[in-house]
Amino acid sequence: MSHSLFQQSLLIKKSFHKLSQIRNTNRRKFVTVRGDWETVVGLEIHTQLALSQKLFSSQKTLTNSSPNTQVSVLDAAFPGALPRLNENSLVCATKAALILSSSINSRSYFERKHYFYGDLPAGYQITQRSKPFSKGGVLHLKKEDGFQQNKSIRISQIQIEQDSGKSTLGSSEKERFIDLNRAGVGVLEIVCEPDIRVKDHQMKQIIVLNPKKGSWRCDINVSVRKAGEKFGVRTEIKHLVKYSSIKEAIDYESDRLCRILENGGEIQQETRGYDISKKETFHLRSKEESEDYRFNEFVESVQKSLPESIEIRKKRLTSQYGLSSYQIEILIESPGSVEYFEKSSMKFTEIQVIGEVFGWLKMRNLSLNNCPVEPESLGELLDMIEKNEISGLMAKNVLHAMMDGESQNPRDIASKYGWIQLNDEKALIHICEEVCHSNPDTVLKIKQGKERLIGFLIGEVMIKTGRKSNPHVVNTIFRNIFGLSEKEKK
């Protein structure tokens, strides 16, 4: 390890040791919560890169300068100003990655993270998310570093980004002073996994870097849970710059979250600040999801907006619905027909109904997408056919009623006009026996082997029931009457 890397490694561990000496001396607004809660902490550490110039401009990074005297046209977001990466930032990032055993990506890139504050003139921050400088890593801590037991903190990723300016509250809430000297300064963000556990008042074990000259700050993600349960909803506490403040903020927020849960409340994901004088956290804003930052992933966003390609759609319709090439062509040639088909759960096996639909549309020079019957209503009608609630013939009547403007659902229409199929076996047996009694000659011929005449008797039953009886059930009843099984059917 080079001298530089060795010095930085010692610096990190010394910071840990200092934290371990902090005692629980802060006055607490909440009394201690019950000891069966476990606090889970994850850290996002922002440390200023040791660069003489800013990350994307040649402006100097001088400290203790008068406000707004170290600002380039890029820092102030003048139109036409283009960023140019300070290559020394890669050297600093590489050192950090090596110290933390983080895997450096052979290719990483920058993205724009959009949000709007007075100290961010461009309206976005140049940062890394999808492809950061490095991924993974770990920091091993031992008892000799000031901890009760050996501890390993996993690193999620390390990314390079530009800092924002400094916003200071004036004499009133409506007055703010903006200093852009810090805007565009190179920052390394080390994102840690939520590996820190705090139960009762065990010492808070925090990863921090040297706070010399205010060149670092830490965001803390805090959640609470019963030991062994899944992670709870987290809150983020922003911009902590002192060891003592980190510990106090975790103490306060842990108690606040436990209180909410113990009183039957629900934790809201949010971003909070920490008031050093009051020693308590306060609401800043609801926690932003990554989508709200509108990262400029142009190609991906355009790709997601594109419709499904024809070839992919054909393959999917075949595998998902078992449609033939002919059926797929019928759907694809008419815009919107595939969408209608999928919403209605249309089944091409119901050829009577489907034929009526396409025939009706063709006569009026309309596509399936312009069908007056809602796809959900057609889907319900097809389900009724599949469940033998209605015959294909009666389904055509229902379909025509809907096409002619009936606004009720298919089942109500069928009930209204008496088109619901008769499936009651007891009632049908009685009707079938009456038909046999009325047609003794036909019955005799069937017994002599002319089974086809069963179709005549089925027709008679259909007439008696107003074509509402289930022909399959009726056929089974007649075959049972004559002692014929389905296998003997000729």
Image (cartoon, rainbow, N blue to C red):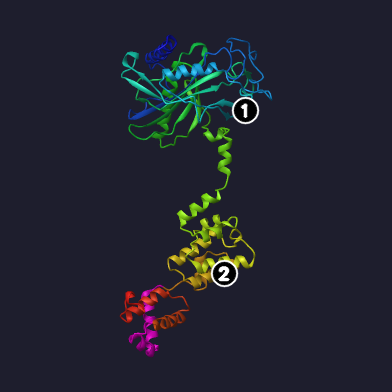
Which numbered circle lies on residue 123? 1
Place of residue 182 in the rendered image (x, y in percent of width and height, measured from the top left): 59, 17
Task: Report the span colored magenta.
Answer: 423-451
Is 489 or 139 nearer to us in this picture?
489
Type of amino acid at the residue the image marks with label 2: His
Mainly helix, strand or loop, the magenta region? Answer: helix
> Is residue 482 left or right of 190 when viewed as pictured?
left
Place of residue 252 in the rendered image (x, y in percent of width and height, measured from the top left): 43, 24
Place of residue 486 in the rendered image (x, y in percent of width and height, measured from the top left): 34, 75
Quadrant of the rendered image containing residue 109 = top right
Place of residue 241 in the rendered image (x, y in percent of width and height, measured from the top left): 49, 17
Tell how many labels.
2
Q: Which residue is mark 2?
A: 400
Check the picture and name the quadrant holding the C terminus. bottom left
Q: In the picture shown, does residue 437 fall above or below 106?
A: below
Q: Is residue 55 magenta?
A: no
Type of amino acid at the residue the image marks with label 1: Gly
Check the picture and name the quadrant holding the N terminus. top left
The answer to whether the residue labelled 2 contacts the one labelled 1, judged by CB atoms less than 8 Å apart, is: no
Farthest residue toward the bottom?
441
Spatial CA span between label 2 and label 1: 58 Å
> Is residue 197 left or right of 403 when viewed as pictured?
left
Q: Which residue is at a point 47% across and 16% down the rendered structure image?
A: 242
Q: In the picture shown, does residue 304 fall above or below 427?
A: above
Quadrant of the rendered image containing residue 53 = top right
In terms of sequence position, does the residue under pointer 2 or pointer 1 come before the other?
1
Local crowd size for mark 1, using a 10 Å CA cut-off: few (<14), some (14–19), many (≥20): some
Is 490 or 3 nearer to us in this picture?
490
Is 74 or 88 nearer to us in this picture?
88
Q: Secondary structure at mark 2?
A: helix
Q: Which residue is at a point 41% across and 83% down the rendered structure image?
A: 457
